[in-house]
């Protein structure tokens, strides 16, 4: 199972969006995308995940299995 950070990075790369471009879309810094979201993704708020997904043209689906 992939970590949330790896999945987010893959979604961003698949969309052809750089960290810098995504940071601009989300009104944040590239450091935030890289460090806090893609690398240290253990404690990300759902609202942040939703913004990230929207920034790369995707949606978030949460499942409990």
Image (cartoon, rainbow, N blue to C red):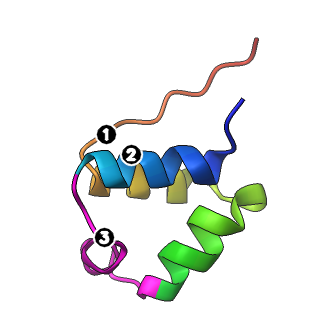
Choose the circle earlier in sequence order: 2 or 1: 2
The residue under the point 72% across, 67% down is 40
How far separated are the C-alphas under marks 3 and 1? 13 Å
* Nearest to the observer: residue 64 or residue 56: 56
How far separated are the C-alphas under marks 2 and 1? 8 Å
Left or right: residue 7 versus residue 63 is left
Query: Is residue 40 visible in the rendered structure shown here?
Result: yes
Q: Position of residue 11 (x, y in %)?
A: 39, 45
- Where on the picture, by quarter, is residue 42? bottom right
Query: In the displayed structure, would residue 30 be above or below residue 26?
Result: below
Query: In the displayed structure, would residue 17 be above or below residue 62?
Result: below
- Where on the picture, by quarter, is residue 59? top left
Tag of residue 22? 3
- Rendered-image quadrant of the C terminus: top right
Task: Give the SS element for disc 3.
Answer: helix
Tag of residue 11? 2
Q: Is residue 17 magenta?
A: yes
Q: Position of residue 34 (x, y in %)?
A: 53, 75
């Amino acid at each position: 199972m992939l970590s949330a950070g790896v999945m987010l990075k893959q979604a961003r790369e698949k969309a052809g969006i750089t960290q810098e471009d995504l940071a601009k879309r989300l009104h944040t810094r590239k450091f935030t995308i890289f460090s806090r979201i893609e690398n240290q993704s253990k404690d990300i708020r759902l609202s942040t995940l939703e913004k990230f997904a929207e920034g790369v043209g995707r949606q978030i689906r949460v499942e409990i299995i």
